[in-house]
Image (tube, rainbow, N blue to C red):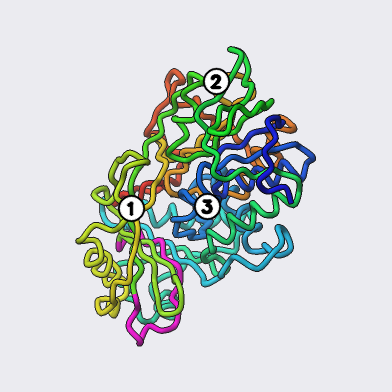
């Protein structure tokens, strides 16, 4: 391994030690590229260390569903693909969508989106309340006439996966530099020449910024500013009552307004949807612990779907950050001077796509295009294009939402 090496020249500098950055470093190193990953703290310190890591593949547009499926293939087969202990737990996963009068078309859209998943090789199916009661008899499903079910989805140990990816990248020849903050990008005016760091200048032929809500701070020296906002989003860990000792499925429950997953034996991680739970903040100065009222809010929200969770106990929680793009879809590709790329703006739905984004960006850098997904819809400059419509759906089957979950489906 070459962890901790301090050379001042590389072919590709990757900024950010989350799942996207570590995956990119691994894919580049496997292709024989000299790559250096720079992380200002420790690998998985940022968003990848605080994510719920729900591994759903349910999307209403093909590019993101493709990335999610490709990511699942890596996570689900981690020992064979990356190496090391398994990181994925396949609990099964349910996605609900609002079918009230204001969102009446969502039921048919869900059927069509399940068909899209099936075309991409994802064994999802639409289920009704009777099957949901068989799957989760302790939950109430009277308000869910239809949902999507992925039997082989679940969640990931995000820290183990991110750090394991960094170890695999180092074993393949990448240099991993922790505790090395990137202060800016250097260029000769037409193309990138490297990055300025707290350890000095690192010369590079190409730079990829995968720094989440800190992306613009890194890009500032290159004269590039992307519309990325940092949103604070809380999660709580609850101790389930003994009658719910067995783990439940993973829920992305837009009807009840929650996302949740088993966290550890007898425990559940839950996040509450809603615009009042998504606060714009300074990523270097925000409250990292739960607000005083959040535990009661989380318990009440969980109890809407699983009534016995009204007797749950609060164990702890934290707040993480979403790097929001204006349309909630990622920004992937070149920006500014030649050789400068970004992978950011995942809007709270990036971890599951991380291994696939790393591969796609590596292929883009080495071969000029990704082999398995069209990255053009994710082009970072789309927001400045004449006639670009921020509210235009990415597909005819994009859902209407009655609650804000940060990202779209």
The image quarter in which residue 14 lies: top right
Q: Tell us which disc is closer to us: 2 or 3.
A: 3
Residue at 67% from the left image edge and 62% from the top image edge:
78
Decide: is 234 above or below 61. below
Which residue, given by chain and number where applicable, does mark 1 sit on? 288
The image quarter in which residue 366 lies: top right
Disc 2: CA contacts within 10 A as few (<14), some (14-19) or many (>=20): some
Residue at mark 1 to residue at mark 2: CA–CA distance: 33 Å
Which residue, given by chain and number where applicable, does mark 2 sit on? 336
Residue 284: where, in percent of width, then height? 36, 41
Tell which of 123 and 307 is nearer to you. Answer: 307
Decide: is 270 above or below 370. below
Residue 79 counted in the magenta span: no
Nearest to N terminus: mark 2 or mark 3: 3
Tell which of 208 and 387 is nearer to you. Answer: 208
Q: Secondary structure at mark 2?
A: loop
Tell which of 22 and 272 is nearer to you. Answer: 22
Decide: is 3 above or below 292. above
Query: What is the magenta range?
Result: 239-256
Q: Is 312 left or right of 253, judged from the image as shown?
A: left
């Amino acid at each position: 391994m070459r962890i901790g090496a301090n050379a001042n020249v590389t072919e590709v500098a990757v900024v950010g030690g989350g799942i996207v950055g570590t995956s990119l470093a691994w894919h580049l190193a496997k292709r024989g590229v000299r790559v250096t990953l720079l992380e200002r703290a420790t690998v998985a310190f940022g968003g990848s260390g605080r994510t719920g890591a729900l591994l759903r593949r349910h999307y209403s547009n093909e590019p993101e569903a493709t990335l999610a499926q490709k990511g699942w293939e890596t996570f689900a087969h981690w020992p064979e693909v990356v190496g090391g202990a398994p990181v994925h737990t396949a609990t099964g996963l349910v996605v609900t969508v609002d079918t009230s009068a204001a969102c009446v078309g969502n039921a048919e859209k869900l059927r069509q989106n399940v068909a899209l998943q099936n075309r991409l090789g994802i064994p999802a199916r639409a289920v009704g309340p009777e099957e949901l009661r068989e799957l989760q008899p302790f939950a109430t499903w009277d308000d869910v006439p239809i949902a999507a079910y992925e039997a082989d989805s679940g969640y990931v140990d995000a820290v183990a996966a991110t750090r394991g990816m960094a170890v695999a990248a180092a074993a393949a020849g990448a240099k991993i530099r922790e505790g090395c903050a990137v202060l800016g990008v250097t260029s000769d005016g037409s193309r990138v020449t490297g990055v300025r760091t707290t350890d000095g200048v690192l010369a590079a032929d190409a730079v990829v910024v995968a720094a989440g809500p800190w992306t613009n701070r890194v890009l500032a020296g290159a004269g590039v500013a992307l519309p990325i906002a940092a949103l604070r989003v809380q999660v709580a860990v609850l101790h389930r009552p003994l009658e719910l000792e067995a783990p439940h499925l993973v829920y992305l429950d837009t009807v009840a307004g929650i996302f949740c997953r088993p966290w550890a034996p007898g425990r559940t991680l839950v996040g509450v949807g809603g615009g009042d739970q998504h606060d714009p903040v300074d990523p270097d100065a925000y409250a990292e612990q739960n607000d005083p009222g959040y535990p009661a809010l989380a318990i009440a929200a969980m109890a809407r779907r699983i009534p016995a969770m009204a007797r749950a106990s609060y164990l702890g929680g934290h707040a993480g950050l979403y790097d929001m793009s204006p349309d909630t879809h990622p920004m992937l590709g070149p920006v500014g001077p030649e050789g400068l790329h970004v992978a950011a703006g995942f809007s709270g739905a990036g971890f599951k796509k991380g291994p696939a984004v790393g591969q796609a960006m590596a292929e883009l850098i080495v071969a000029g295009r990704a082999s398995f997904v069209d990255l053009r819809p994710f082009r970072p400059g789309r927001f400045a294009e004449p006639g670009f419509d921020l509210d235009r759906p990415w597909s005819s089957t994009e859902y209407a939402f009655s609650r804000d979950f940060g990202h779209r489906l």
